[in-house]
């Protein structure tokens, strides 16, 4: 029998564990939850337009993202 999600990271941060995240340009395009977060207990992935204002908020969970250079 093979293990399910064998390629999924085992050390994934719980989705939406924090309410404020600092991201950099290497994280673009920005999505919530972030790719390194576990998805099993989270909302659907949504892409966030952070480039213009350098800050944005997820419409699902309210997490705030700040773009840092």
Image (cartoon, helix red, strand yellow):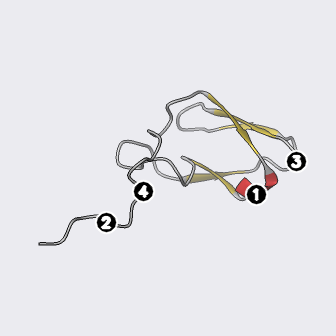
Q: Quadrant of residue 47?
A: bottom right
Give me the residue at 31% from left, 66% from top.
6
Q: Are marks 4 and 1 in contact (CB under 8 Å)?
A: no
Given this view, does label 3 or label 1 mark the residue nearer the observer? Answer: 1
Give me the residue at 76% from left, 57% from top.
26
- Indicate the position of residue 60 as horizontal and vertical percent values: 53, 38
In space, the residues marked 4 and 1 are separated at their CA atoms by 19 Å
Instruction: Point out which mark residue 6 bears.
Output: 2
Residue 18 lies left or right of residue 1; in this view the side is right
Of labels 4 and 1, earlier in sequence is: 4
Check disc 4 and report the residue beneath it: 9
* Circle 4 Cα neighbour tier, 10 Å, few/some/many (<14 / 14–19 / ≥20): few
Tell me the element at label 2.
loop
Instruction: Point out which mark residue 12 bears.
Output: none
- Indicate the position of residue 1 as horizontal and vertical percent values: 11, 72
Tell me the element at label 3.
loop
Of labels 3 and 1, earlier in sequence is: 1
Residue 3 or residue 38, whichever sits in front:
3
Check disc 3 and report the residue beneath it: 52
Residue 11 lies left or right of residue 2; in this view the side is right
* Circle 3 Cα neighbour tier, 10 Å, few/some/many (<14 / 14–19 / ≥20): few
Of labels 4 and 3, earlier in sequence is: 4
In space, the residues marked 3 and 1 are separated at their CA atoms by 16 Å
């Amino acid at each position: 029998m093979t293990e399910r999600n064998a390629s999924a990271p085992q050390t994934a941060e719980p989705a939406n564990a924090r309410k404020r995240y600092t991201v950099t340009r290497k994280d673009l395009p920005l999505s919530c939850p972030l790719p390194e977060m576990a998805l099993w207990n989270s909302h659907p992935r949504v892409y966030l337009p952070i480039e213009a204002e350098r800050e944005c908020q997820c419409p699902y969970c309210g997490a705030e993202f700040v773009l840092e250079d």
